Amino acid sequence: MRTRRSGCPINLTLETFGDRWSLIILRDAMFGGRRRSFRSFLNESTEGIASNILSDRLQRLTASGLLTRAADPGHKQRIVYSLTESAIELVPLMAFMGSWGIRHALPSFELSQRAQVLEDGGPQLWDEFMDELRHIHLGLPAPGVSALAKMQAAYEASLSE
């Protein structure tokens, strides 16, 4: 176990996933459906993470209990990464970060649409999204509502504006 700088909960949270790449990887697993392989995280992220950084962060996120990794039964050389319950519980934090970014960071219109849907939907939509992530990543029953579909529809609509 690593030594901790302090027992402060904010510090401990930042020590767990406080670098930008870890949050981007978790974002991509939550919102982008990237979990099938190392290559999908590497090639489909718009931020351009280096392969050595990605490898290190996937190992860290797995060691800290935010991701699990398992062999893909359909492809012997592929690993499937899944969010754990503790990672899924980061949805409200991601929603707040997205809301803050919309107001203060001048994001692109298209890429802010998912965050806007989460902000507009509030805690009820966050819960629906977490239930959907539990279905996708943990194998729980599918929810009746797809928060991902709402976010994707908003994104696609923004592309035609």
Image (spheres, rainbow, N blue to C red):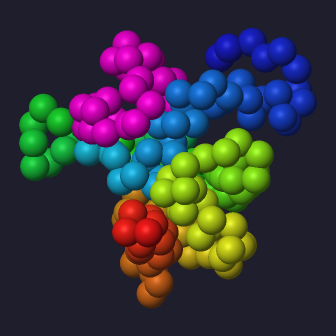
Residue 70 visible (yes or no): no
- The residue positioned 55% from the left and 31% from the top of the image is 22
Position of residue 78 measured from the top left corner of the image (x, y, whole percent): 18, 36
Question: Does the magenta run of residues contain 43?
Answer: yes
84 to 44, vertically: above or below: below
- The residue positioned 34% from the left and 18% from the top of the image is 51
- Asked if residue 64 lies left or right of residue 146, the reply is right
Furthest residue toward left = 75
Question: Does the magenta run of residues contain 15?
Answer: no
Tell me where residue 11 sits by quadrant. Answer: top right
| Chief SS of the magenta region | helix
- The residue positioned 45% from the left and 87% from the top of the image is 144
Residue 109 visible (yes or no): yes
Tell me where residue 116 sits by quadrant. Answer: bottom right
- The residue positioned 69% from the left and 67% from the top of the image is 119
Position of residue 66 measured from the top left corner of the image (x, y, whole percent): 54, 40
Tell me where residue 142 sits by quadrant. Answer: bottom left
Along the viewing direction, whichever of 148 and 112 lies nearer the viewer? 112
Position of residue 32 measured from the top left corner of the image (x, y, whole percent): 40, 52
Furthest residue toward bottom = 144
- Asked if residue 122 lies left or right of residue 30, the reply is right
13 to 134, vertically: above or below: above
Q: Total label count?
A: 0
Along the viewing direction, whichever of 86 and 94 lies nearer the viewer? 94
User: Over which residues does the magenta segment extend?
Assistant: 37-61
Furthest residue toward front = 161
Position of residue 131 measured from the top left corner of the image (x, y, whole percent): 52, 71
15 to 160, vertically: above or below: above
Q: In which quadrant of the rendered image does the C terminus lie?
A: bottom left
- Asked if residue 69 lies left or right of residue 16, the reply is left
